[in-house]
Image (cartoon, rainbow, N blue to C red):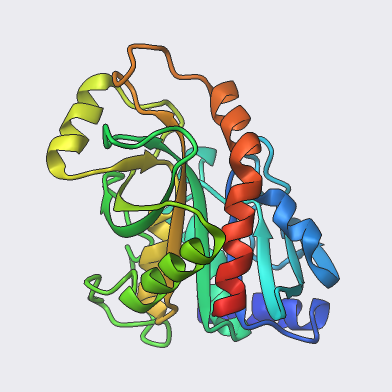
Amino acid sequence: MMEQIRESANCLRQAFPMGAELGIVLGSGLGPLADELTDAAAIPFAEVPHFARSTAPDHAGRLVCGTLAGKRVLCMQGRLHGYEGLSPAEVAYPIRVMKAFGLRSVILTNAAGGINLDFAQGDLMVIDDHINFTGLSPLTGPNDPELGPRFNDMCYAYPRALRELADRAAKDCGIVLRHGVYVGVNGPQYETPAEIRMFRTMGGDAVGMSTVFETIAAAHCGLPVLALSMITNAAAGVTGEPLSDEEVKEIAARQGEKFRRLIRRIVELA
């Protein structure tokens, strides 16, 4: 795998010769942030060797590199998911390429359902920890010691320093920032009310179909992660109303500017 990662990273160096220091994976509602980059260049996932193609709705499926808030950043405008039929290793592959490309940290973003009854639509949450309920891992199979150890520690997958930086950025922006535990599921179906009750009992605060594979791979290769969720809807059974993808997209679009404002400030402080 390391040889494939090098080929992908070399492709990015040719496409983005100025390089970058921070990575941002743009989830639902945040795609427009990539359009704010100055001195930017872009390349579709399909043109990067060994990258899978994104098929998720409203995910552009391209890498954009440029300047944001005075920093050189590499954005994934859209991401990969297990529910697209991809393996965990394929979903996490771009994170390993980001590390090889020379990034020093990555910001992961997502849209999530609110499990915590104190959360409201439009809330933003720092992920303090996660529960991987997919039953899968991008580290399954032979381990390449060049990537990381056979058995890597997940105690510090979300470094405290980056979470505190997000708190400072939110205070500067006048944004209330929640903290909580993210439950990662495969999807694409939404969860049942019984599953949400179980997740709440287990200590989950939000649930979504991304992020955990990327975080596991980042921890494995030593790439610090800050992960942020936008609570776009109450999870199954909380309100008694059916879940709707249209509602998720509507809230993500409506609250997207607040989310993007927070990201800009985080990048500025990083």
Asked if residue 1 is positioned above or below residue 253 in the image, the reply reads below
Q: Position of residue 131 (x, y in %)?
A: 25, 51
Name the foreground residue: 105 vs 259.
259
Q: Quadrant of residue 42?
A: bottom right
Asked if residue 148 is positioned above or below residue 48 in the image, the reply reads below
Going 51% across and 46% down the picture, which residue do you hit? 81
Name the foreground residue: 179 vs 29.
179
Q: Position of residue 183 (x, y in %)?
A: 30, 45
Residue 4 visible in the displayed image: no
- Horizontal side of 241 relative to 107 (left or right) equals left
Residue 259 visible in the displayed image: yes
Which quadrant, please, contains the C terminus? Answer: bottom right
Name the foreground residue: 50 vs 220.
220
Asked if residue 58 is positioned above or below residue 139 in the image, the reply reads above
Going 56% across and 60% down the picture, which residue do you hit? 173
Q: Position of residue 87 (x, y in %)?
A: 46, 51
Q: Quadrant of residue 118?
A: top left
Q: Quadrant of residue 97?
A: bottom right
Going 45% across and 67% down the picture, which residue do you hit? 166
- Horizontal side of 97 relative to 15 (left or right) equals left
Name the foreground residue: 120 vs 194.
120
Going 58% across and 82% down the picture, which residue do you hit? 103
- Looking at the image, the residue that sits furthest to the left is 201
Asked if residue 193 is positioned above or below residue 218 in the image, the reply reads above
Q: Position of residue 72 (x, y in %)?
A: 71, 80
